[in-house]
C-alpha cells in the first residue's frame, strides 16, 4: 500500500504544479492547516453535532440496556398530593411518617430527593425534630444537595444549596445531585464530584457501598463528569406512588433490600428535565444516574479543547489521505469516513467508556475531504478543457484532410461532407481527379470516435495521397497497401470499413471496391434504386484481405450515394433509429427521382426525425451524380 500511495501523491503533486500557480498552492495548504483550528475555535456546529449523535445513540442503545433491579422510585405524584389534606410543601412531620412507613419495608437505602434548606416555621410545630428523629431511626436515609451556576456582577459563580444542619447530621450521608444542562437545554451528563466544594455525588456514595469502583478525574480543579446511560430493555425502572405508604404499617415486599428514591414526580411540582430520551422527572433522572454507575456504563466525556484539536487534526490527515486515493468516489469516501468514525465512537462509548468529541472530528474531516475533492475536480476540469482544446485542434486538422470544394465536371459531380459527433471523428471521405482523367472517390468509417479514430483517418489519407502521386493509379494496389499498413501498425486492433471507387467519365464506367461498409445506394435514371455491396471483411483485420469488386455503368442522371452507418442509426427521443427505409425514401424523393444532390440537403429528413437529439456517431455522405442528358430533361418535363 505504501508504493501506490506514494505514486498517487507524486502524481497529484505533479498535476497540482502543472495547473495551479505557487501562490494559490500555498494559500490552499494554509487553508487545509486552518480547518482543524477553525473547527475547534468556532465549535458550536461541532457541539450541536455531538449532541445529536449522543441523543440518537441513547434512543437506540437504551433499548438494548437492562436497568438494574436494585432501584425503585417512590413518587409523590398527583394521587399522593390529592390524598394529603395539607398543600405542598408539606409540614415536616408528614415526611417523618412517610419515611418510617417506607423503612418498615426494609429498603437498603432511602435517597430523599427533596431539599430542605430552611427550618420549618415554629408555628407549624416541631416538624424538624420529628423528621430528624425519623431520619436517625431509619439510619439509611441519604439527603441530597445541589449546585447551581449563577451570573453575578463578579462573573459566573457556583451556589451550593444544602439541607439544614440538623438533617445533615442525622442522615447517613448528604450527597450532590447535579445534572449538567447543555446549551440546548438537555441534560446528557451528571457530576460525580465537585472539586471546589469537595462534594461527592450521592449516586457515587451509594455505588461505592455496593462494591462499584467509581474512578476519579486525573485533572486538577476539574469536576468528575459521567455521561448518562439510559436503560429500558424489559421496562423502565419501576415506580410506586407514595400514597401507598401513608398511614400504613404493612411492609411492601417489592422494595425490600432495594435502593429507594423518594421524590416529587407530579408535574405540578415542576421537577422535570429534558434528556436525550425526552422529558423526565427529577427522581427518575437521579435513578438513571445511579443505574449508570451501578452497571458501570458511565462514559467519561473528553470535551476539552486539546482533545478536540487532536481529533480534528487526525481527521484532517485521514481525510487528506482518503481524498487523494479515492477522490473519484467522493460520496463513497464521505460515507465510509462517517460510518467508520461512528463505529469507533460507539466502541469507545460502550466498551472503553469514553465519549469522544465526534463533531469536531467529522466536521474537520468533511471540510478537508470536500476541499481536496473540489481541488482535484478543478484540476480534472482544467485537464478536460485542455483535452477539448487539443481535440478541437485535431478536428481542425482533420477537416484539412477533406476536399475543400466539390469536384464539378461537365458530365458528373462528386461532393461530400462530414459531421463528427465530437470535435474529431473517425469518418473520412476523399475525392479528386487523377492525372489519368479518372475520378477517385472514397468513404471510410474507423472503429471508435475522437482523436484516436481521427489519427487512423490521417493514415488512410496519407496512403491514398501516396498513390495519387503515381502516374498510373491502381485501386487494387492502393487498397492492399492500406490494409497492410493498418494491420501491421495497429496489430489488427483497428478496423476500417470503406468503399473505394474509380470513375472513368468517357466510358461512364465506375469500378467499386467495398470493404465491410454499408451498401451504397445506386439511383437509376428511371427512379428506381439498387443497393450495391459485397460481403468482405473491413480493412486492418487481416494481413491479406480478399476484395470483392463491382462495376457499374452510370447513365445520364444516375447517382451513387455513399454514407456511413451513423445516418441510419440516428435516433429520436423515443429511441427509434432513422432506418434504411426512411433513408432510401428520402434519396429517391418518394417518386423515383433524386431531387436534391447536395449531401447536406439529403439529411434534412433525418434531422427532423431526431427532434433535436444529438447523434451518437459520425455522419458522412458522399454523392457522385452524372449529368442529365437533354433527352432525360425533356422526358422529365
Image (cartoon, rainbow, N blue to C red):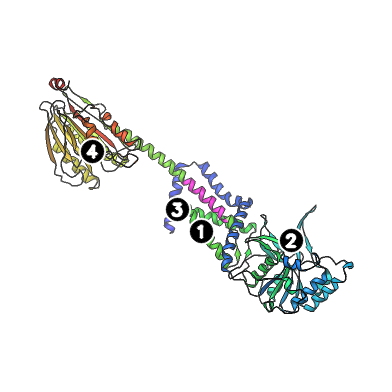
- The residue depicted at 87 percent of the width and 68 percent of the height is 124
The CA distance from mark 4 to mark 1 is 55 Å
Query: Which residue corresponds to mark 4?
Result: 580
> Can residue 428 be seen in the rendering of this structure?
yes
> Which SS class for mark 2?
helix
Query: Which residue corresponds to mark 3?
Result: 326
Q: Quadrant of the C terminus?
A: top left
Q: Are marks 4 and 1 in contact (CB under 8 Å)?
A: no
Is 484 displayed left or right of 13 in the figure?
Answer: left
> Can residue 465 be seen in the rendering of this structure?
no
Q: Is residue 538 above or below residue 229?
A: above
Is 258 displayed left or right of 635 in the figure?
Answer: right
In the rendered image, residue 67 lying in the magenta stretch gets the answer no
Residue 472, position as x, y percentages in the image: 13, 32
Task: Looking at the image, tell me whether mark 1 or mark 2 is earlier in sequence order.
Answer: 2
Q: Where are the magenta residues, as a range?
A: 361-376
Query: Which residue corresponds to mark 1?
Result: 339
* In this rendering, the label closer to the viewer, 2 or 4: 2
The CA distance from mark 2 to mark 3 is 58 Å
* In this rendering, the label closer to the viewer, 2 or 3: 2
Amino acid at each position: 500500500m505504501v508504493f501506490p500511495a506514494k505514486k498517487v501523491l507524486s502524481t497529484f503533486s505533479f498535476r497540482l504544479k502543472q495547473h495551479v500557480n505557487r501562490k494559490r498552492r500555498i494559500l490552499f495548504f494554509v487553508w487545509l492547516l486552518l480547518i482543524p483550528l477553525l473547527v475547534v475555535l468556532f465549535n458550536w456546529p461541532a457541539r450541536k453535532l455531538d449532541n445529536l449523535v449522543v441523543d440518537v445513540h441513547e434512543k437506540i442503545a437504551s433499548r438494548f440496556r437492562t436497568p438494574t433491579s436494585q432501584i425503585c422510585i417512590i413518587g409523590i405524584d398527583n394521587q399522593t398530593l390529592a390524598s394529603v389534606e395539607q398543600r405542598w410543601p408539606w409540614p415536616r412531620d408528614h415526611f417523618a411518617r412517610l419515611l418510617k412507613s417506607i423503612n418498615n419495608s426494609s429498603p437498603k437505602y432511602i435517597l430523599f430527593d427533596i431539599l430542605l434548606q430552611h427550618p420549618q416555621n415554629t408555628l407549624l410545630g416541631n416538624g424538624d425534630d420529628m423528621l430528624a428523629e425519623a431520619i436517625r431511626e431509619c439510619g439509611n436515609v441519604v439527603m441530597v444537595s445541589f449546585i447551581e451556576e449563577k451570573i453575578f456582577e463578579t462573573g459566573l459563580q457556583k451556589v451550593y444549596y444544602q439541607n439544614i444542619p440538623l438533617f445533615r447530621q442525622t442522615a447517613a450521608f448528604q450527597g450532590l445531585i447535579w445534572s449538567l444542562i447543555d446549551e440546548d437545554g438537555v441534560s446528557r451528563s451528571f457530576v460525580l464530584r465537585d472539586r471546589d466544594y469537595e462534594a461527592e455525588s450521592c449516586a457515587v456514595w451509594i455505588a461505592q457501598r455496593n462494591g462499584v469502583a467509581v474512578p476519579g478525574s486525573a485533572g486538577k480543579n476539574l469536576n468528575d463528569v459521567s455521561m448518562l446511560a439510559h436503560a429500558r430493555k424489559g421496562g423502565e425502572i419501576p415506580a410506586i406512588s407514595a400514597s401507598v405508604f401513608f398511614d400504613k404499617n404493612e411492609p411492601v415486599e417489592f422494595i425490600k433490600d432495594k435502593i429507594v428514591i423518594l421524590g416529587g414526580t407530579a408535574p405540578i411540582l415542576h421537577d422535570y428535565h429534558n434528556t436525550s430520551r425526552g422529558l423526565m422527572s427529577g427522581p427518575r433522572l437521579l435513578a438513571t444516574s445511579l443505574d449508570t454507575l451501578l452497571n458501570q456504563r458511565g462514559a467519561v466525556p473528553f470535551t476539552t479543547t486539546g482533545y478536540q484539536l487532536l481529533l480534528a487534526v487526525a481527521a484532517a490527515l485521514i481525510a487528506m489521505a482518503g481524498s487523494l486515493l479515492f477522490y473519484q468516489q467522493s460520496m463513497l469516501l464521505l460515507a465510509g469516513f462517517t460510518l467508520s468514525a461512528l463505529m469507533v465512537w460507539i466502541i469507545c462509548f460502550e466498551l472503553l467508556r469514553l465519549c469522544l468529541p465526534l463533531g469536531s472530528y467529522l466536521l474537520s474531516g468533511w471540510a478537508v475531504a470536500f476541499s481536496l475533492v473540489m481541488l482535484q475536480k478543478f484540476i480534472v476540469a482544467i485537464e478536460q478543457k485542455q483535452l477539448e482544446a487539443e481535440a478541437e485542434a485535431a478536428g481542425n486538422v482533420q477537416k484539412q484532410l477533406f476536399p475543400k470544394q466539390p469536384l464539378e465536371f461537365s458530365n458528373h459531380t462528386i461532393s461530400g461532407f462530414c459531421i463528427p459527433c465530437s470535435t474529431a471523428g473517425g469518418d473520412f471521405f476523399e475525392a479528386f481527379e487523377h492525372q489519368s482523367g479518372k475520378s477517385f472517390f472514397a468513404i471510410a468509417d474507423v472503429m471508435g470516435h475522437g482523436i484516436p479514430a481521427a489519427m487512423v483517418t490521417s493514415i488512410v489519407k496519407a496512403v491514398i495521397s501516396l498513390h495519387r502521386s503515381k502516374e498510373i493509379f491502381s485501386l487494387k494496389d492502393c487498397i492492399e497497401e492500406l490494409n497492410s499498413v493498418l494491420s501491421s501498425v495497429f496489430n489488427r486492433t483497428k478496423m476500417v470499413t470503406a468503399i473505394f471507387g474509380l470513375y472513368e467519365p468517357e466510358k461512364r464506367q465506375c469500378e467499386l471496391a467495398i470493404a465491410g461498409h454499408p451498401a451504397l445506394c445506386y439511383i437509376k435514371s428511371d427512379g428506381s434504386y439498387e443497393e450495391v455491396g459485397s460481403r468482405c471483411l473491413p480493412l486492418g483485420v487481416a494481413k491479406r484481405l480478399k476484395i470483392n469488386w463491382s462495376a457499374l455503368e452510370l447513365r445520364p442522371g444516375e447517382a451513387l450515394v455513399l454514407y456511413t452507418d451513423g445516418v441510419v442509426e440516428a435516433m429520436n427521443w423515443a429511441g427509434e433509429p432513422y432506418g434504411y427505409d426512411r433513408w432510401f425514401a428520402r434519396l429517391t424523393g418518394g417518386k423515383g427521382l433524386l431531387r436534391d444532390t447536395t449531401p447536406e440537403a439529403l439529411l434534412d429528413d433525418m434531422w427532423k426525425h431526431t427532434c433535436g437529439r444529438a447523434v451518437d456517431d459520425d455522419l458522412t455522405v458522399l454523392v457522385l451524380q452524372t449529368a442529365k442528358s437533354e433527352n432525360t430533361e425533356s422526358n422529365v418535363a
